[in-house]
Amino acid sequence: MRGIDTVIIEKRSRDYVLSRIRAGVLERGLVDLMREAGVSERMDREGLIHEGFDIAFSDRCHHVDLAGLTGGATVMVYGQTEVTRDLFDARDAMNGIIIDEAEEVLPQQVDSDRPYVSFRKGGKTHRVDCQFIAGCDGYHGVSRTVIPSAVRQIYEKTYPIGWLGVLSDTPPVSEELIYVHHPRGFALCSLRSATRSRYYIQCDSSAQLETWSDNRFWEELKRRLPESAAASLVTGPSIEKSIAPLRSMVVEPIRYGRLFLAGDAAHIVPPTGAKGLNLAASDIGFLSQALVRFFTEADESALTDYSAKALRRIWKAERFSWWMTRLLHQLPAADSFDQRIQKAELEYLFSSRAALVSLAENYVGLALE
Ligand code: PHB
């Protein structure tokens, strides 16, 4: 890219990465980034532009007119897995190196000007010498731990609930997403296309996937949907089913020497609001700009600013994801006062344009600055 050589070192196989189902709502910033990078052709053809979504409570759907509230901003419904597939294809087309199924990957000497990454593959230890390392190895990755504990601060919150998700080749119950607040727990109706649906229900964090037959899932989902939606729900066999934990986490700083963390290696958001991929993309947007500036203009200032700049946006998305999670779920620790506040907040939201504008501008994605 722009004459800068890059090597991707990946723990998993390509098939594994492309079989994982993640969220599917792209902010305009990510859509723009895909276009600028020249990898948007399929997204622009197959992605669905959404101008709004619904929040259901007390058995009624309330509309959030994203475009109307934000002066025309929309989101794109396109699966994260498809974004990943398009990036793999683009990487292949430029003959970019991807070393997959690499074991024991470890950034080394990151506080020197000769960092390198060591890893094992094919029974041998290898190393890649480089100028900079982007630590994009997710929440369970090793990059974050390379920052000495005396330097790094971790902020974390776990929610004692999970999301049970089902993907099915059934027509979606609605063209737009429906986020559901219900006494039995949160639910979400999402989609990937006119023939493929993605549904979630809040479950206990201890829930076992094996105890959730398709039938049990559909029955529970139906009980949580407003009557009109429940009546038109089309069910069918699941093609993927998984449980995701809900947690918030931020590490600071996200730069240490020549190591720059991005995405889930640096922060986790609960899935409510679909900010995870978008935040990873804005990190990478900032980082790639900073690297280009360094290599083309010998200007290091954007690299120096990376951590503080990315963290300002990260914390705002953390706040929004936390807020939307608390607004819509039944949290085991909530007492009767908390429940009344939650109800008042939902009612306030749909009686105040100011409150709705705040929700909408966060949902479509805050400015990249
Ligand atoms: C999804 O389609 O998987 C999805 C959509 C919206 C969310 C989370 C997940 O907030």
Image: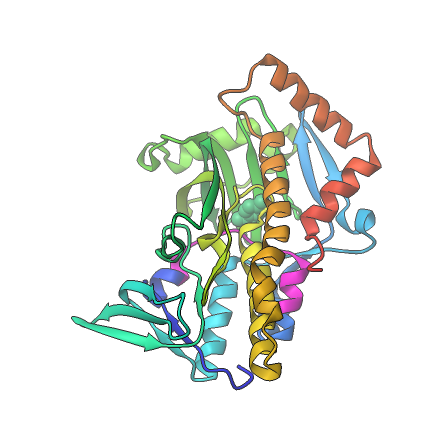
Q: Residue 75's spot in the image, x, y percent?
A: 68, 55
Relative height, residue 118 to residue 150 (above, below) = below
Q: Position of residue 6 (x, y in %)?
A: 44, 78
Left or right of residue 198: residue 327: right
Q: Position of residue 225 (x, y in %)?
A: 59, 31
Q: Report the residue that reaches farthest toward the left.
A: 123
Identify the image quadrant of residue 55: top right
Residue at horizontal 72%, vertical 41%? 359
| Quadrant holding the C terminus | bottom right
Q: Measured from the top left, where is residue 207 in percent x and y? A: 37, 31
Q: Residue at x 37, y 34 (%)?
A: 212
Count of marks overlaid on the render: 0
Residue sitting farthest toward the bottom: 3
Tell me which segment is drawn in magenta.
18-33
Say which of 27 and 61 sits in front: 27
Above-or-below relation of 308 to 215: below
As for residue 31 lying within the magenta part, the answer is yes
Pick whichever, 215 or 55, lies toward us. Answer: 55
Q: Left of 252 or right of it: where is 124?
A: left
Task: Tell me if residue 19 is in the magenta stretch.
Answer: yes
Residue under the point 63% across and 14% down: 337
In-image side of 93 versus 149 (left or right):
right
